[in-house]
Amino acid sequence: MLLRSLLLTGSLLASLGAGALPVAAQAPPQQTPPQQAPTPSQAEVSAETIDQFVAAFKQVQAIRESAQAEMAAAVEAEGLTIEEFNAMVEAQQDPDSQASMDLSQQDIERFMAAADQVSTIQQEAQGEIEAAIQEEGLAVEEFSQIMALAQQDPELREAINQRLNE
């Protein structure tokens, strides 16, 4: 359970410096695997749906940025740097890695406290992301499908980027 939590925590903190291209950003994690619905083609994504997607995407990005700032603050409030925290996550994932280190009891306690806070922030952000997507009239699965399609379809990606820049 702890390792799973730390894996999720580490992947979120690793994204603190990630993603300048909006369409290349990750789709929000899903609680259950998506249904095997047919993936729409660019021609099947209406202008209205693109507008809904763009509005939801902007909200998702704002939520992610806020959550990332909160996670960084939580880690730093425990007296750790992001780099130290990420190294501890890596050491937990692979004890034989170069990141494996001897930690004092105090370091472990600070890490655990930060990891708990980061996990809570992550869960809250996930709920906010899902609500934001749904408020724009899209299902989370539909949002994820459009995101995946935009990564493969240059025309759809361009249509989304144009609307993002308006």
Image (spheres, helix red, strand yellow):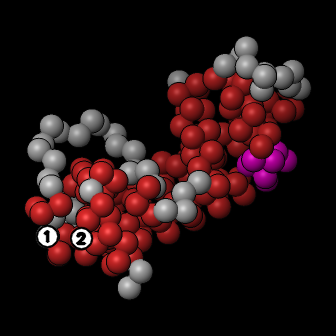
The single residue placed furthest to the top in the displayed view is: 96
Secondary structure beneath label 2:
helix
Residue 141 is situated, as x and y percent measured from the top left of the image, at 24, 50
In the rendered view, tell whether residue 118 sits above or below residue 102. below
Q: Find the residue positioned furthest to the bottom.
A: 166
The residue under label 1 is which amino acid type?
Ser
Height in image: 117 above or below 43?
above
Q: Residue 47 colored magenta? A: no
* Residues packed near mark 1 inside 10 Å, few (<14), some (14 to 19) or many (20 plus): few
For the residues bearing labels 2 and 1, Cβ distance under 8 angstroms: yes
Q: Percent from the top left, x then y, of residue 15?
A: 59, 50
Q: Which residues are magenta?
A: 75-82
Q: Taking the image as drawn, is residue 133 in sight?
A: no
Tell me the number on the disc at residue 50.
Answer: 2
**19 vs 1: above or below:** below
Q: Nearer the viewer, residue 116 or 44?
A: 44
Quarter placement of the C terminus: bottom left
- As drawn, is 61 to the left or to the right of 119? left
Q: Neighbour class for label 2 at 10 Å: few (<14), some, many (≥20)? A: some
Point 15% across, 55% down: residue: 41
Indicate which disc residue 46 carries.
1
Callout 1: SS: loop
